[in-house]
Image (spheres, rainbow, N blue to C red):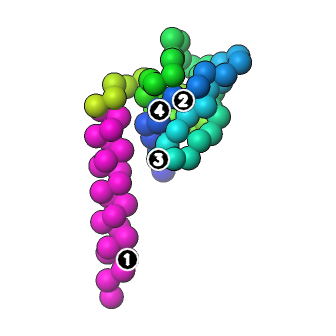
Amino acid sequence: MCLAVPARVVECLEGVRALIDLEGVRMEISLELLDDVRPGDYVIVHVGYAIGKLDEDEALATLQAMAAMAQADAREGAQP
């Protein structure tokens, strides 16, 4: 299964690279597939590439839903 996640662009780097932040984890990604990405934008990241842009409200709602699913999984795993 493949998963793409929203992340906030912290800094645009030389070439077509950017530094992103995802829940406190920072990593460098490629912007090769997108135009006009700026710091503060939210992008959808898949295997190190930004594959789409989305607005902040949608990104935050998605991240919140992913966190809720992770918490539910953790609770289910903790029960006998």
Tag 2–tag 1 contact (CB < 8 Å): no
Q: Is residue 8 above or below residue 38?
A: below
Nearest the eye: 34 or 36: 36
Disc 2 residue type (three-letter):
Val
In 3D space, how far apart are the residues under numbered discs 1 and 3 (Cα atoms)?
22 Å
Real-space Cα distance between discs 2 and 4? Answer: 6 Å
| Local secondary structure at mark 2 | strand
Residue at numbered disc 4: 8
Residue 52 percent across, percent down from the top left: 45, 25
Q: Name the N-terminal-most of marks 2 and 1.
A: 2
Residue drawn at x 32%, y 73% is 75
The reply to whether residue 66 is in sight is: yes
For disc 4, the neighbor class at 10 Å (few under 14, some 14 to 19, many from 20) is many
Q: Amino acid at mark 1?
A: Gly
The magenta region covers: 58-80
Q: Secondary structure at mark 3?
A: loop
Name the residue located 28 percent from the left edge and 40 percent from the top edge.
61
